[in-house]
Image (tube, helix red, strand yellow):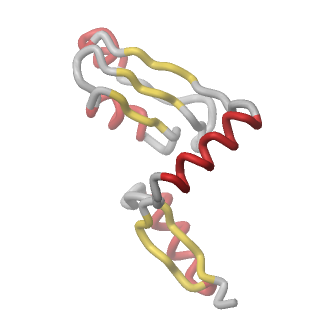
């Protein structure tokens, strides 16, 4: 991959390093598992990767993003939608790292 968006999930940084092409860029946009991670340094050096930490932008950036999402009809990737009573199952799935996309909770309202 030329560009990888890294959300900071458990062990996902090393999957992102593996997925990036030589000279690729990894944008770190979250720290879901905390600020301390074990990183495969060999991948960074061996592939000449660029790791870039991104923080939240301005209100104008947010408004522009919302407009682009609406204009291009972008939709999130949803892995699973669970009823509220199955939240523990969703948390276990998230902890396992087996999900690909968002785990949603349906409150049945």
17 lies above or below 5: above
Residue at x-position 52% and y-position 30%? 28
| Residue at the limit of the structure toward the right, as seen here | 59
| Residue found 56% across the figure and 83% down from its top | 86
39 above or below 105?
Answer: above
Placement of the N terminus among the 4 image quadrants: top left
Q: Where is residue 29 in the image (x, y as percent from the top left)?
A: 56, 34
Q: Does residue 44 lie above or below 98 as drawn?
A: above
- Where is residue 101? Give x, y as percent: 43, 58
Residue at the far bottom in the pictured view: 108
Q: Position of residue 18 (x, y in %)?
A: 27, 31
At x 38%, y 33%, the residue is 4
Front residue of 26 and 15? 26
Vertical relation: 45 (above or below) 79 = above
In the picture, measured across the screen, residue 97 lies left or right of residue 63, that is: left
The number of callouts visible is 0
Q: In the image shown, does 47 or 72 lie closer to the viewer? A: 72
**Quadrant for the C terminus in the image:** bottom right
Locate residue 79: give its quadrant: bottom left
Q: Which residue occupies 62% across, 30% down?
A: 35
Does 32 sit left or right of 98 as displayed? right
Q: Determine which quarter of the picture holds residue 47.
A: top left
Q: Which of 95 and 77 is in front in this view?
A: 77
**Residue 59 x/y as whole percent:** 76, 37
């Amino acid at each position: 991959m030329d560009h990888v968006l890294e959300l900071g999930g458990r062990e996902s940084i090393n999957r992102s390093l593996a997925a990036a092409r030589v000279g690729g860029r990894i944008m770190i946009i979250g720290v879901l598992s905390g600020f301390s991670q074990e990183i495969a340094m060999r991948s960074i050096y061996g592939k000449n990767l660029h790791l870039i930490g991104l923080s939240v932008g301005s209100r104008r950036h947010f408004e522009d993003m919302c407009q682009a999402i609406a204009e291009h009809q972008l939709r999130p990737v949803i892995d699973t939608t669970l009823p509220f009573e199955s939240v523990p199952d969703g948390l276990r799935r998230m902890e396992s790292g087996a999900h690909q996309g968002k785990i949603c909770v349906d409150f049945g309202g």
